[in-house]
Image (cartoon, rainbow, N blue to C red):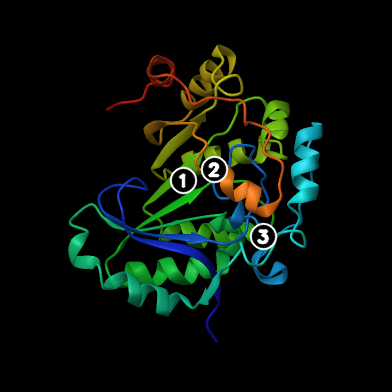
Amino acid sequence: METTGYIHSIDSFGSVDGPGVRFVTFLQGCHMRCRYCHNPDTWKLANADAVSEQPISENAAQAHANTVQNTASDSAAPSSVCNYKEMTPSALIRQALRYKRYWGKEGGITVSGGEPLLQIDFMNELFRLAKENGVGTVLDTAGQPFTRENPFFSKLTDLMENTDLVMLDLKHIDPEKHRALTGHSNENILAFARYLNEIGKPMWIRHVLVPGVTDDNENLHGIRAFLDTLSNVKKVEVLPYHTLGIYKWESLGIPYTLKDVDPPTAESVKRAEEILGCQK
């Protein structure tokens, strides 16, 4: 019997989630509670037994993060706003292959979230089928589920065999500020980046630039110093903070704590790109 995946949404012609034109699948379920998340409707775990390899083990260190965690618990999210559908890997790859002629040499499929590593059995089957059909694969992840303990680690090792590129979000370099921002520390996320470096897996780094939260010199230079310890980083992207997802927070009844924060200026983005070594 095939593994079932819990799908939040699909973008048939994605152009910003990996190289070339891509079939982008967003999976349902995430343990992190990022203050600026523009898809809080992906947080709810569709089936806790099926998608969770480990429980949420850390609480937010700050009051705002505690509020988000409690308000956005699985049972609190209205089902009318957290719609998802179930698909098998073979059904999803058949749908993706309809668009293969548009991908060119660089395109393929990208799986994002939510957090795709929470559905690692589904990911393994999907990427295996993708490679059997000559399809390029990209994993877009925050890395939070990472552990070297089994069964997760052995499954991740298998997944990497069929993964061409990992796009990793680095939210903040300081572990406590990361916890205040997302509800979790970042030690295992940085460990995940080091693991990808150990196995030589190509990696793109993304960093969301939030004025007053992630745009300070200490954070940006800290991220750059960490990246300098890695040899597998092929690209670094700065993603300017935006407020386009606030309506989803309001629909879910979750307090949004960054209402008074404006998007970064073009000058601020350029400065961050220079520090992080982004290449156009």
Q: Are marks 3 and 1 in contact (CB under 8 Å)?
A: no
Mark 3 vs 1, N-terminal side? 3
* The furthest residue to the bottom: 1
Identity, as a three-letter code, of the amino acid under mark 3 = Lys
Instruction: Work out how far the residue at label 3 is from the one at label 2, CA to CA, in angstroms.
Output: 28 Å
How many other residues sit within 10 Å of disc 2, few (<14), some (14-19) or many (≥20)?
some
The image shows residue 240 at horizontal and vertical percentages of 45, 30
In the image, 256 versus 100, the foreground residue is 256
In the image, 236 versus 267, the foreground residue is 267
Q: Quadrant of the N terminus?
A: bottom right
Residue at left offset 66%, top offset 25%: 174
Identity, as a three-letter code, of the amino acid under mark 2 = Tyr
Position of residue 4 relative to residue 249, above or below, is below
Image quadrant where residue 52 sits: bottom right
Secondary structure of the residue carrying tag 2 is helix
The image shows residue 53 at horizontal and vertical percentages of 69, 61
Position of residue 177 relative to residue 32, above or below, is above
In the rendered view, does 39 fall on the left or right side of 106? right
Q: Would you name the residue on which mark 1 appears?
A: 199
Circle on res. 195: 2
Circle on res. 44: 3
Instruction: Work out how far the residue at label 2 is from the one at label 1, CA to CA, in angstroms.
Output: 6 Å
Mark 3 vs 2, N-terminal side? 3
How many other residues sit within 10 Å of disc 3, few (<14), some (14-19) or many (≥20)?
many
Instruction: Work out how far the residue at label 3 is from the one at label 1, CA to CA, in angstroms.
Output: 32 Å
Identity, as a three-letter code, of the amino acid under mark 1 = Ile
Query: Could you tell me if residue 83 is visible in this image?
Result: yes
Residue at left offset 69%, top offset 54%: 149
Q: Are marks 2 and 1 in contact (CB under 8 Å)?
A: yes
Secondary structure of the residue carrying tag 3 is loop
